[in-house]
Structures are given as structure tokens and as C-alpha cells.
Image: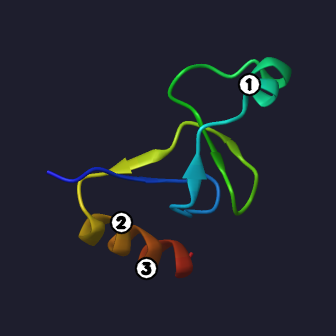
């Protein structure tokens, strides 16, 4: 099974692990990511497949 992670705020899959400086400044915990698109640092939404992610993106656009 493929795991797909997306930003909780904007839905982007463009995530990275925060730099050490950001970790110290924001006191983030292991498992958190930084969205390269909106800058949000937090836990991502995890989907089981690209299909599930595509459904989420479609629903998010309709909200």
C-alpha cells in the first residue's frame, strides 16, 4: 500500500521535514512536515492511495 501525505491547511503534497532552526523556533515534534507551498508546519493528512488523495482534492475544491 502506498502512503500519500498532504498539507493539512492547503492540501499540497509538496512537503519537507522542517530545518533544525525551524524545529527549535517552533518547537515542532517528530513526524511534522513543512508545506513548501503555504509554509504550514504540522502533521500531514495521510491517504492510503493517490486515488484517495484525488478524491480529497476534488472535495476541497468544492468547499
Q: Position of residue 9 (x, y in %)?
A: 64, 54
Q: Which residue is mark 3?
A: 58
Q: What residue do we see at 43% from left, 79% from top?
A: 58
CB under 8 Å between callouts 3 and 1?
no
Q: Position of residue 32 (x, y in %)?
A: 57, 32
Cα–Cα span, label 1 and label 2: 29 Å
Q: Quadrant of residue 24?
A: top right
Q: What residue do we see at 40% from left, 68% from top?
A: 56
Quarter occupied by the C terminus:
bottom right
Q: Which residue is mark 1?
A: 20
Counting residues from the start of the chain, the first of labels 1 and 2 encountered is 1
Q: Which residue is mark 2?
A: 53
Q: Position of residue 14 (x, y in %)?
A: 57, 60
Q: What residue do we see at 46% from left, 73% from top?
A: 57
Q: Is residue 32 above or below residue 7?
A: above
Q: Is residue 35 left or right of residue 52?
A: right
CB under 8 Å between callouts 1 and 2?
no
* Dot 1 crowding, Cα within 10 Å, few <14, some 14–19, many 20+: few
Camera-side mark, 1 or 2: 1
* Dot 2 crowding, Cα within 10 Å, few <14, some 14–19, many 20+: many
Amino acid at each position: 500500500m502506498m502512503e500519500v501525505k498532504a498539507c493539512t491547511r492547503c492540501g499540497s503534497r509538496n512537503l519537507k521535514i522542517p530545518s533544525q532552526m525551524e524545529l527549535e523556533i517552533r518547537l515542532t515534534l517528530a513526524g511534522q512536515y513543512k508545506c513548501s507551498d503555504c509554509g504550514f508546519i504540522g502533521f500531514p493528512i495521510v491517504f492510503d492511495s493517490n486515488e484517495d488523495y484525488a478524491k480529497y482534492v476534488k472535495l476541497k475544491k468544492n468547499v
